[in-house]
Amino acid sequence: MKIKKASIFTILLILLSLSALAGCASRTDVEAMQSDRQQDLNRIRQLEAELAESKQQLKAEIEKSNDPLREKSADMWAEIQSLRTELAKMRGEVDNLNIRMDRQVGGTDSAVTVDALAKRLSEVEFAMENELQVDLPKIRTERDAATAAATSATATASATAPADAPEDAAAAQTAGTTQAAPQAQADTDPAKALYDKAYALYKEGNFERARSYWAEFTDTFKGHAFTPSAVFWQGQCYYMLKDYARAVILYEDVIEKYQKSSKYKAALLRSGYSWEHLGKPELAKMRFTEIIKKFPKSVEATQAKRSLDKMK
């Protein structure tokens, strides 16, 4: 009987020991999970801090490299303004000459003549073309082509109007006038014209000029609906020029300021590519992972997965 009681007591001790061990194991698992989660949070904070630090460093380097360029641009701008003033002055003098129908301006002893003005105008054009790299012939050609196209479009519209006109001629004239006004307004929209010009240059492979047009767009038409796209395309121009530092700054601007833009997904992907080119694989992975989480079924997510696979 005593032996039986001792056996029961031994079994109870074993069961209590196993229960205690199980409790310890479960607490250990929970503590391990909490530790892993805390490590993940710390890693995310570290990546965010690294992202902010990298952006600041890139901006500082870009600002430093831009200082001589800004000084040169300021000098060029002052020279252009001076040339514009000189041209305006000469045009006024030429107009006076044409009005007076005389070879001489003022008294008979005046030294200002048409030939002298023509020479000065030639010197100014030479300076603009050779020193400031202004393509005057191309500007004239584009202006003449635009004028010819507008004239041709007007003539075509006039020629085809009777065939498309309703039976009531008076109603047709009224409808035509009403519909032409919005179209004319769209054609003369300076913001759209500037944006389209930049995009045309980009498609031609003229990335630097395209970027300058988009930069002018964002500076001139602040708050425009095309602004997020204009910022993104500036980044694209720098990316195509392999200037990844400037490209990633613009992509990150789209990510931070224009999350509802149609360019948001593309900016995330391109930012990842740029960080990878800049030797920041952790930041690149962060952007690729963000695309996959937020837009799992998108084309950008597919490309991000491929990039992550290559980085393993």
Image: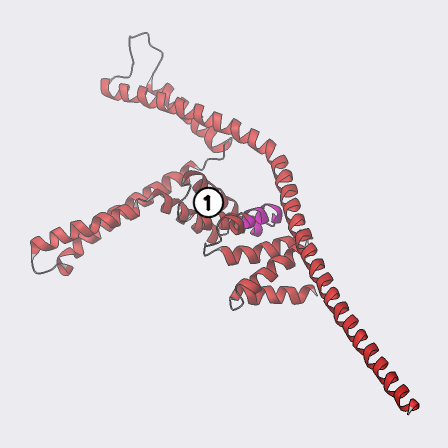
Frontmost residue, 199 versus 112: 199
Which residue is farthest bottom?
A: 1
The residue drawn where x is 50% and y is 52% is 205
Which residue is situated farthest in the right direction here?
3
Find disc 1 in the rendering and name its residue: 214
- Residue 248 covered by magenta stretch: yes
Assign the N terminus to one quadrant of the image.
bottom right
- Residue 304 sits in which quadrant? bottom right
Left or right of 51? Residue 88 is left
Residue 152 visible in the current orientation = no
Q: Residue at x 61, y 53 (%)?
A: 274
Residue 228 picture location, percent across and down: 46, 49
- The reply, left or right, for residue 26 in relation to residue 51 is right
User: Residue 135 versus residue 266: which sits nearer the camera?
Assistant: 266
The magenta stretch is: 239-252
Say if the magenta span includes residue 217: no
Which image quarter holds the C terminus? bottom right
